[in-house]
Structures are given as structure tokens and as C-alpha cells.
Image (cartoon, coloured by chain):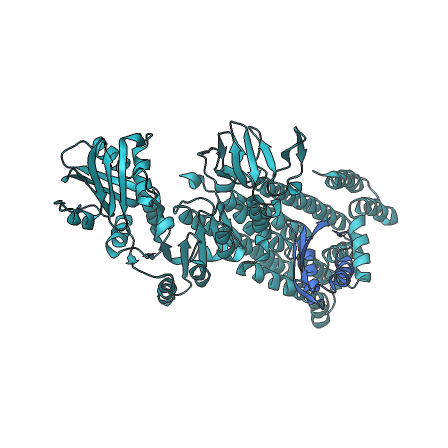
Chain colours: A cyan, B blue
Amino acid sequence: MNHRQKKMLWRILAGTTLFILALLLPLEGWTRLAAFLLPYAVVGWDVIYKAVRNIAHGQVFDENFLMALATVGAFGTGEYPEGVAVMLFYQVGELFQSCAVGRSRKSIASLMDIRPDYANIEREGRLTQVPPEEVAVGDTIVVKAGEKVPLDGVVLEGTSSVNTAALTGESVPRDVAPGDDVVSGCVNQSGLLRVRVTKPFSESTVAKILDLVENAGNKKAKAEHFITRFARWYTPLVVCAALLLAVLPPLVLGGGWGDWIHRALIFLVISCPCALVISVPLSFFGGIGGASKCGILVKGGNYLELLADAQIVVFDKTGTLTRGVFNVTTIHPDVISEAQLLEMAALAEGYSDHPISRSIREAYGMDLELSRVGKVVELPGRGVRALVDGKEVCAGNDKFMDDIGVAWHPCHRLGTTVHVALDGAYVGHLVISDEVKPDAEEGIRALKAEGVQKTVMLTGDAKAVGEDVARRLGMDEAHTQLLPADKVDCVEALLTEKTGKGKLCFVGDGINDAPVLSRADIGIAMGALGSDAAIEAADVVLMDDKPSKIALAMRISRRTLRIVRQNIVFALAVKAIVLLLGALGMANMWEAVFADVGVSVIAILNASRALRVPDSANS
Amino acid sequence: MKKQFQLEDLDCANCAAKMEEAIKKLDGVQAASVSFLTQKMTVEADDGQFDAIMKKIVKVCRKIEPDCTIVL
């Protein structure tokens, strides 16, 4: 509770005591009125003050004015205890409301607690702490164990593991060594790192993410627009209804002014749409905050709303469903051992910079004794010929084997095959392919479970490779051998296939699919850690590389919408019932106050559930 | 030009919505949003008359919610 809330609490306690006294004392006439006016003034003076002031400003349908009118009206009709009680109850509700909103605000803020407070910079041989904004590109900063990396940069010295959980939701730390990039917002877990800054703070990953999440509220969801429109009409309508209720029935039916005015006052109490105006944006805000905790950045309430209706999900293959890096996936030796074949190939390819050569060396893993290698000839589009330990090793594709007259046999495994021949005799082959991400299959299955009707893969890759990946992942369709422009056409065609409210999502790595990302109803970019293009182009950004996060985003979206719907229905239903009962003379002002602030508090508490993320977030 | 301002003592969500409406109606304002939750106001307006527009915004907001102050 902050200072103002505490003050309010004391006023409520004092008011309540005075109110009970007034109820107990056997007073009559003027003294009775005065006894009730005292607690009324203690509790509600600010409401009255604001009401008068706001009327002077021409703000008629203001909450304070309506509440003041209702309670003064109660005094006017002789219902002193009710006037005080309603004001008291209203203030208690407002206090609850302000505390609940404050709490939600705080928990959202803590979700986004990735802003670094300072950077350690070396000046004249001494470490000084400066605000991250003051560090320039090219400066060297020092990040100690346990500290947040304040700015994006490259490691100059030191090795450590950094925890990216705050950015990606991924709990497994990442190892960094000199030459590696580190992004701001990560926490350095073990060693001391010296980092050369590559971006000013305003362009750093952390600043971008914070900006994105904080401004997500500016893109409003349909439900939010509905509430704003509703709020604009609701209050004037209820006030007019109250006026009619106070005047018409007594004129038509004759007499009984007091009773009808009392019923009209009940209307005034319920005429603020606050429960909805606060809780609906709060739910979306919470949903977006919760999603960002899992490494899913949603750029606006509108996108969070759309995600729930995803019907067709289109994936780019390389870098999205697959790792986008080449790996040796199969080693098929003919006469020698696997290790021997791999070593031989790695040595022969030892001097080559080709991605395939590099992947073979990586698969070998150990340091290469390049002194064993001599007379290397690289034959572009064919392979490599080299002397290893004095023997001639040829490593390359089918054509190369044909050229040198070696009998080879094809491999049943898909991917790029590298055959190896030793002194003119075939010794086996390696298959190199882009690896499917470990959670891709599960991710596709989860999407199906969430009710996505169709999953499609688009790729520029060869037909056999693309279709094989799609089949293994259990996808419904695969379009292969596409040029970037063809992908747009494909998405256009798929957009005509969706039915009803269904939406089309496109998932890509953001590198060359910006046109497709913007053409789709929802563009999702992944692997955004460090990629500005992806953050710019997409509507939803996945901070890590996991396709399974899409289903999670859908779950968060649906949960948020469910909470929003509950709040709208609940608030409207309670208000409608109390209005009806009030018009019929069956509700009292207490119930009306509940329908106003009580409902607000319940709706806010319900909305704060949106902040919590489903437990399966990281599985 | 787009600028963001911190708001203090913005206590009522409905007022925030009303402020947003009123700011949007001002001449020269291209876009505006008032967030009750983050207590922030974002205004996008013509560069040349930004300061004059801000003065109008302060006036309009004071009319709707006198307790709320815009940190300029």
C-alpha cells in the first residue's frame, strides 16, 4: 500500500467507527442528521470536492459526480444510514481496486525486469559504474558473475555461461567464449567477461524488447475497442434511464416520488463502466506480459486476439523447422571403421572453407594434425583430393567418383552425400543434412491438438529433401523448390482456403521472408535474439528457436481471451440484474455499490490471472 | 514526432480513456494513447507545433482529470 492508500484506509476506519456510533446513539431530527453527516464527510469529502470541481469543468458523467449525487440523494430522501454506507462501501471498493491494480502493475513490471541498471566501464585503469545509456559503441565493459549484460557486444576476454531465461524463457544457459556475441539482458553466471560494445543502449536487444512490450498496449484488441465504445454510451444511457425512472412513473402513476427517486439513485451508482474499462486491457496486458516471460513477444493485444483463431500455420523450412546448419547425420563405411572414415574425410577436407567441409570437421570434433595432409587440390563442384599419410584420399560427390573411375553406391538417406575413396578404392560415404529441430515434431503435433487444421511447409530446397522433412514432422502439405517470390504466391493461395474467423500464421526466421511475414494474418519470426530484421517485420517474435512455442502462444492467447470474456459477461450480467432489480424496487443501494466497485475488484483479480503462464511453458 | 510521457496519479481507467479521446480530437495530433496500466501517454503530432499541442494536451487533461499530472 502506498502513502495515499494508507491515508484512505485510516479515513475508512475512522468513518466506520463514527458511522457505528451514529447508528447506536438514540438521536432524533437535526442531531441525527449531523451524526450521520460527520462520517459521511470524513469518508467522502474528496468525492464531493471532485464532483463539484469536475462539474465546473463540464465533466458531467463523472464517477465522483454520480456517486455524490446518489449519496446526497439518499440523504435527501431521509435514508441517512444508506447514504453513509454507500459512500463507505464505495471508498472501500475503490481502495481495493487501487491496491489490486497496483499489485498487477508491479507483477507485470517484475516480469519485465530485464532492464540493466548500470554498466561497468574501464576508465583510467579503474572500473566505474555508469548508466548503460552513457556507454558508446566500441567501449569495453566488464560484466562480473551474477550481473546482467547491460549492452549488446562481442566477448573480448573470458569464458562463462550466460542465462538467457529472462529473454527467451529457456533455462539452459549458453556458453560464451572470446569472439562470441552476447546480448543485453542475459545474466552472466560464472566468469568475468570483458565485452566490446557493438550497439548503443537505445538499439540494444533489451531496449527493443522493453519498448515492444510496453507499447504493445497501443495496438488494441477488438475486445478493447468494444469496451471503449460501450463505455462511451453506457454511462449517458444509464443516467438518462435514471432520470426517466425518477420522473415518469410518479407522473403517470401519481405520487410516490421518494421511492422512485431512490430507485433512480441506484441506477446512478451502477452507471460507471470501470470494471470493464480496467479489467479488459489489464487482461491483455497480463497475457502479453506472461507470454514475454516465455520468450514470446506479442506486439499488440490485437495479435494476441488473432492467435486464438489460427487455422492454417505455414512454416518456412530452413532455420525454422530445421536448425539451418549442416551436420553429418550418417556415416556409412564400407571396409574401414566409422571413426577411420570420418577422420580420413576430415583430414582431406582440412583446408577447405566450404560449409560441408566445416560440418565434417565439426563432426570429427578433435584437433586435426594437418601436418599429415599434403598436396591438397580442391575441385569446385566435385570435391577434394589430398594426400593423407602418403595415401591419396578423394572426398566428393557422385560426379567426382565417376570422374576418377571409382565404383560408388547411392545412399538411402536424404541429404548431401560425400563419398570417400582411398587410393582409388571406395571406402564409404558420409551424409550431411540440415537437422530437424528436436521439438519440431512435437510442436506440429501440439498445433494440431490446439485445433489448427492445416500445417504447411514452404521451402526453396529440393523436392525429396523437403517432402521427407514434412512427412517426418507429420505436416499436411509441403511446397518445395520455391523462390522467395513464390512463397508470397503460395501464402496468397492458402489465404483463400481459410474459412470463417480462421487466421493464417506464417512462421519464418525473418531473414528474407519479410514480405510473407507481413502478408500473413499473423507473422511470427523466430530466433530473434540478435536479429533486428525479425523484430521489425513480425507481429509475434519468438526469442528462441523453438517451433513448439507457437502452440504455447496459442494457449496463452485463448486463456487471455477466456478471461476477457468471463469479465465482460460477468460485469454486464451483474449490472443488468441489479439495474433490473433496482427498477423494480427490489435492490438496495448496497447491492448497487457491489455491482459497481465489487464487480470491478473481482474483474481485476480475475484479469491478473492472465499474468500467470501455463505450467507446461518450458516443456 | 512521437513522444512518450509519464503520468502521475492517474487513478481512473475511464478518465484515461476519456483523455485519450479528447487528445485525439485536437488539431495536429496524429495519434495518441493513454495507458492506465503503464501510466504512460504516447503522442504523435506534427513536429513544428509539438510544444503548442502539448500545452493544449495538458489543458485538456487537467479538465478531465485534475489530479493527474503529465511529467514533461
Say left or right for A298 vs A387.
right
* Residue that lies at the very extreme toward the left in this rendered image: A407
Say left or right for A24 vs A477.
right
Please state which of residues A567 and A510 is positioned toward the viewer in this rendering.
A510
Residue at x-position 59% and y-position 32%: A142
Count numbered badges in the picture.
Answer: 0
Q: Is residue A127 visible from the viewing direction of this image?
A: yes
Say left or right for B63 vs A382.
right
Please state which of residues B4 and B17 is positioned toward the viewer in this rendering.
B4
* Residue that lies at the very extreme toward the bottom in this rendered image: A252
* A213 to A122, vertically: above or below: below
- x and y, in percent, of residue A379 in the image: 26, 48
- x and y, in percent, of residue A510 in the image: 44, 54
* Residue that lies at the very extreme toward the front in this rendered image: A375
- x and y, in percent, of residue B55 in the image: 78, 60
- x and y, in percent, of residue A550 in the image: 41, 49
Say left or right for A258 vs A358.
right
* A497 to A291, vertically: above or below: below
Q: Is residue A561 visible from the viewing direction of this image?
A: no
Query: In which image quadrant can residue A325 be found?
Result: top left
Q: Quadrant of the C terminus of chain A?
A: top left
Q: Quadrant of the N terminus of chain A?
A: top right
Please state which of residues A143 and A497 is positioned toward the viewer in this rendering.
A143
